[in-house]
Image (cartoon, rainbow, N blue to C red):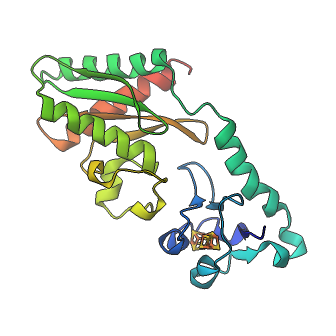
Amino acid sequence: MATYVITEACIGVKDATCVDVCPAACIHTTPNAPQYFIDPEICIACEQCFFVCPVDAIFLDADVPAHLEQYLQLNADFFTANKQQATAITPAQAQTVLDAVQRYATSARFTVAAAVVDGAGAAVLANALPGADEATATLALNKAYTAANLQVATHQLGRGAQTPSTAAPEGFDQARMTAQPGGYPITDGALVIGAVGVAGSPTPQQDLQCCQAGLAALHGAGH
Ligand code: SF4
Ligand code: SF4
């Protein structure tokens, strides 16, 4: 079946204009990937992305110029890699993140709720530290859920990040989406393997710093 393909002109632009118009939600990227890619298994070849790309990066597969033909494979490989990857952070990694969040909050003398989810947003570990109420714990979980599914830090959503809700995977629960700071994707190389969410700090900025402490511990631990 025909598919559209994103090629090198997207590199450095990556403005997600095409994501906004795609009815199949099959255009994705990761924070570290240089461009967006189209999933050839899902694209319905409706042409909408082709019309809106400001730099003419998108072609029908049959029309890809010879010097850009490698992008046929690059687009497909991006999704193959993602689908083959076990999209879950391990419980041990999740514990490393949560322990670091807890240490950070304790040393700063405040109480938070924190959660780590897998790449699809399902909880791997959640811990409400003493004093954090249920609503705070739910908010932490929703921050992680949002960051995992939209593959973006939640505070960037509040700034109009290049990952609109239309990029959310099928089944994404919009009611759980939050743009409050304190949700971060956890990546393994270019792939999102989970996310951490923190809520309940005295300021939103401190929720965010708790997440960063968790991520620093994970990457510093050599995972
Ligand atoms: S051709 Fe249509 S379905 Fe395919 S990526 Fe573009 S907008 Fe999405
Ligand atoms: S509209 Fe074009 S430049 Fe923008 S993300 Fe899509 S392919 Fe890349």
Q: Position of residue 56 (x, y in %)?
A: 67, 81
- Relative to 141, is 29 on the left or the right? right
Q: Position of residue 109 (x, y in %)?
A: 12, 21
Compared to 153, does 13 lie above or below? Answer: below
Compared to 8, does 186 lie above or below? Answer: above
Which part of the image, by quadrant, shows the N terminus? bottom right
Q: Quadrant of residue 210?
A: top left
Residue closest to the eye, 110 or 23:
23
At 14% across and 40% down in the image, what residue appears? 203
- Relative to 152, is 67 on the left or the right? right
Compared to 221, does 184 lie above or below? Answer: below
Q: Position of residue 131 (x, y in %)?
A: 9, 20
Residue closest to the eye, 179 or 219:
179
Q: Position of residue 198 (x, y in %)?
A: 26, 33
At 56% across and 82% down in the image, what residue appears? 52
User: What is the residue that sits farthest to the right in this orientation?
Assistant: 66
Q: Is residue 201 in view from this perspective?
A: no
Residue closest to the eye, 148 or 152:
148
At 44% across and 60% down in the image, what residue appears? 163
Compared to 159, does 58 lie above or below? Answer: below
At 64% across and 78% down in the image, what residue appears? 46
- Ligand 1, seen in the image, is in the quarter at bottom right
